[in-house]
Amino acid sequence: MSKIDYQDLSAKIMDNIGGVKNVKTVTHCVTRLRFYLHDRNIAEDSEIKKLPGVLGVVYGNGQYQIILGEHLFNVYDNIVKNYSVETEDAIDENLDEDLVQSSEKKNFKYYFSKVILFMGQAMTPFITVVYGAGMLRVVLSLVSYFAPAAAESSTYQLFDFMSQAPFYFMPILVAYGTSKVLKANPAFSIAMAAALLYPNFIAMMEAGEAVTMMKLPVYLTTYGSTLLPGIFSAILVAYLEKLFYKIIPGMLRSVFAPLCVFLIGYPLTVLVLGPAGAVVGSWIVKAIVFIQAHVGGFAPGIIAATHPFLVMMGVNMLMVAPMTELLTRVGSDNVFRPGWILHNISEGGACFAVAARTKDKGMRMAALSAGIGAIVSGVSEPALYGVNLRLRKPMIGLVLGGFIGGSVAGFMGAKAFSMGYSSILGVVIFEKTIAAIIAGVIVSFLVSFIVTFVLFNGKETK
């Protein structure tokens, strides 16, 4: 493969999406360049797919997503450097503009996609932090297992505080992410979420005695390690901020607008939104438990088998919220994280089978690289778009490997006890159930490899 000219590639991408005038904002994940376009129909999908380094194009949740794999960061940096485009962190006083401006038909599908998009964006900063904290907890667990005396030291305890803090202060982290999506001042939403974690507030909630606010009963609950209360309160605060900074005259705005945000927002949060978030979160967990009770150990297998299709539709962030609720409320995740890890292992197994069968040296190297990336780093898009979906038949091995391996892990009781990356390195977060997830890894890899090796004839490389 010839060396890619990233400046030229960036220019052609911008030309084919309609230029700067068609770009509202641009952001990215690990493998995808993500545009919010004024008019999605202007973008020339077929031309973009022909560009060197482009693995595919997906439109989902209001985002025009160009899959670039390893080329992502070079292209993104070139676009931000050479074009006057706003990145996702740009601040705008029109808090709801990005969420409501669209030429799409306002039906159930439209609003559902907006909710999924919103949740994914709001949780992105939070997820990155808790991944790090989760892996830190894994390191501490290994230290305590192999060196019990070290676990008694103050150094260990201080690191343990760091590993626990992002989970406990989850309302603050998700409030920050939510306010950034709504282009609001994050300090307001952070302050509101922090009030729910204030020590005296927690003591009052845990005392068990009736509490009233303005003669209305307060629902007695605590909000540490909760997800939805922080999101709900941040949405409220963002719109209150917009309202009061608009209607209060400039001379009085700097003092009375913040006062009004708290005077109105805090009672609504304590009396309505906080309790609503806690209750809805409990419903989500109950729904997951109910579904699992009916499908049993097949649950992570179903997640693994369907995940590549969610990725293709651009809605793979759909599962992040229920996964987070399950982990924080139950203390473990026996559905989502096992399924995601085993999906990536299956991607890798299918890629390795392609590498073993193909006669094309370029495809062999691409398959090996993508397979290693999926297994070791947990990044599946290059494997999915560059190899398995492109060749079609490996998709059968991928789906069967994920389903069978996930089911094996599920019936053996695999449970993730903290956040972590969905790669082979993530098996350590399964702690006492590590044997179950390792069994799933072996089965997923072998099934996807064998099925792909049998079905793929080695010639479908175009």
Image (cartoon, grey):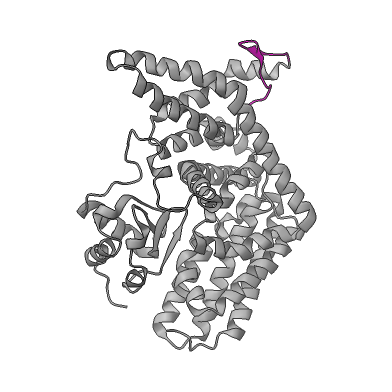
Measured as percent of width and height from the top left, residue 284 is found at 67, 43
Residue that appears at 54% across and 53% down: 109
Main SS category, magenta section: loop
Q: As drawn, is 169 to the left or to the right of 431?
A: left
Q: As drawn, is 47 to the left or to the right of 344?
A: left
Choose between 16 and 249: the one closer to the eye: 249
Q: Quadrant of residue 157?
A: top right
Q: Quadrant of residue 302?
A: bottom right
Measured as percent of width and height from the top left, residue 104 is found at 44, 53
Q: Is residue 331 visible?
A: no
Q: As drawn, is 117 to the left or to the right of 271?
A: left
Measured as percent of width and height from the top left, residue 73 is found at 33, 57
Q: Which region of the structure is painted magenta?
A: 209-222
Residue that appears at 53% across and 76% down: 352
Q: Is residue 387 magenta?
A: no
Choose between 136 and 154: the one closer to the eye: 136
If the image is split into quadrants, where does the N terminus sit? bottom left
